[in-house]
Amino acid sequence: MRSTISRRSFLKGSVAATVAAAMTPPAANAGNALKSIDGQTRPLATLIDIQKCIGCEECVYACQESNQAKFPEPQKPFPKMFPKRVKVSDWSGKREVTDRLTPYNWLYIQRAAVTIDGEEQELTIPRRCMHCENPPCVKLCPWGAAKQLDNGISRLDADICLGGSKCKQVCPWQIPQRQTGVGLYLDLMPSMAGNGVMYKCDRCYNRIEQGDVPACIEACPEGVQTIGPREEIVKQAHALAREINGYIYGEHENGGTHTIYVSPVPFDQLNQHIETGDGQPHLKPVKDMMADGARWTRAMILAPIAGAAAAFGRFYKGVKETEK
Amino acid sequence: MKLDTLVFRKWTYGISLLLLSLSGFGQMPIFKRYYIADIPGLAWLAKFYVTHEIHYITASVLLALVFYISFDFLLRYNRGLRLSFSAYVKIGMIILLVVSGVLMVIKNLEGTRFSHGMIIGLDLVHMGSCMGLLLVSLYTLVMKKRWVKPVVSPSTR
């Protein structure tokens, strides 16, 4: 039987494995289990149980530490941008910022003061890339710098990205963040085209490749996140929502994502109590952004048939007229 | 052939080529950067979902027209007419555009995953063939080169 992995089950597994083979590192056990449930190619999703989160930011620091090598080291001074309206985006001097998404902070804790059963409480919500099932950032990147992996991870390739920020503009949550002064654009036309590299959570694709769980999941002391095959995570999310009489976000947003939140408070209410803005994503309902394009694909399939049919019709009409 | 049909074809081809080029280049974040989207009436060029849909719609129109003209030519007008050299060049560009475009539409469908190299290759072929087609079209427009010309039989040479 397949199973999903939470921090808790991961620890339990580690303890059991340690007893069986004292020298086996715990992360390797989690990795093997993740590999076996993943089957290498199944889309993985994470369940985020909001009521478990205590806002300790362990996940934030684990993310920063684990992804340190991927963070930008920009060259300064930055190239002069043309035209002048193009603003540079420099977070290299503000690496310690953790209250929003930045090129150096791919996960942050969003806070909402809400009333549950008449009692005022602060809910804390880990926010990062949702890893959409049909990600606009990947599909609409004009340069092929974004990619979706078979396990559902959306990843921006820092070696290819030119920093045009289109991925951020088409993302329903405006997740990717730009750092100027780094990347391929410096070798092309740095003043005229591009403006750095876009960064966002890549759900520790390299750790998952090695069979480990993402750093944020491993570091969480409360077992807020669970990772596993999407269909099982969705089932778990529904079971949890039934149990706590809660609400789900991310299952259908933007046509479906690989991040499923479960909250004791309706998300529209939660959305009213969180700080939103640049680098601070909302929790509003999101329609499938790629759906309209997909609808026009059908027209594109019919177009050649219609064109050919019209030509044959014209030909047939001509033959009939000749016979008369 | 009635003159109005020819005019209709010509205008449909011209307008769809113009809209495809604008919405295609609009896939890159350049129109806002270079103030073009600030020109009244052109703000849509900086709206990526709008340009994406317009590109699909006009691509459908161009595809229908390409198939109509191709079959029409094969069925009715191949006698006494042959394609000019510039027409062969333009047809080659259009074939490249259509093939790379179809692959890019497939790439955009949910569940389809192409490699970085494949996507970059398709982007370059699509953009290159578009620019080639625009340049050759400009040349044929200025030089008044036609798509077809009469077949010259040996006896009339």
Image (cartoon, rainbow, N blue to C red):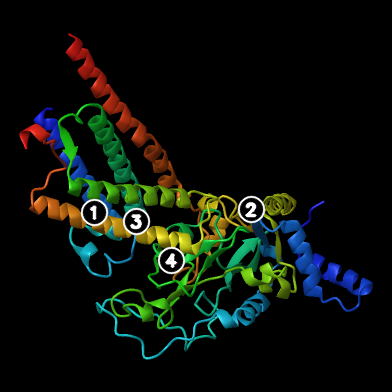
Residue that protrudes farthest toward the bottom in the picture: A77
Q: What x and y, as percent, mark residue A173?
A: 48, 62
Residue located at (91% from left, 74% from top): A21
SS assignment at label 4: helix
The answer for which chain carries disc 4 is: A
Amino acid on which the number 3 mark rests in the picture: His
Q: What x and y, as percent, mark residue B133?
A: 23, 53
Comes first in the chain, label 4 or label 2: 4
In this view of the protein, which residue sits in the foreground, B10 or A239?
B10
Query: Is circle 2 on the same chain as circle 3?
Result: no
Instruction: Using the image, tell me which numbered label, if any, was put on residue B133.
Output: 1
Q: How would you rate the neighbour count of disc 1 (Cα within 10 Å): few for under 14, some for 14-19, many for 20 or more?
A: many
Is residue B14 in view?
yes
Please identify the quadrant where the C terminus of chain A is shown. top left
SS assignment at label 3: helix
The residue where tag 2 is placed is: A247
Amino acid on which the number 2 mark rests in the picture: Tyr
In the rendered view, does A5 fall on the left or right side of A115?
right
The residue where tag 4 is placed is: A168
Residue that protrudes farthest toward the right in the picture: A20
The residue where tag 3 is placed is: B126
Residue located at (37% from left, 81% from top): A186
In this view of the protein, which residue sits in the foreground, A133 or B1?
B1
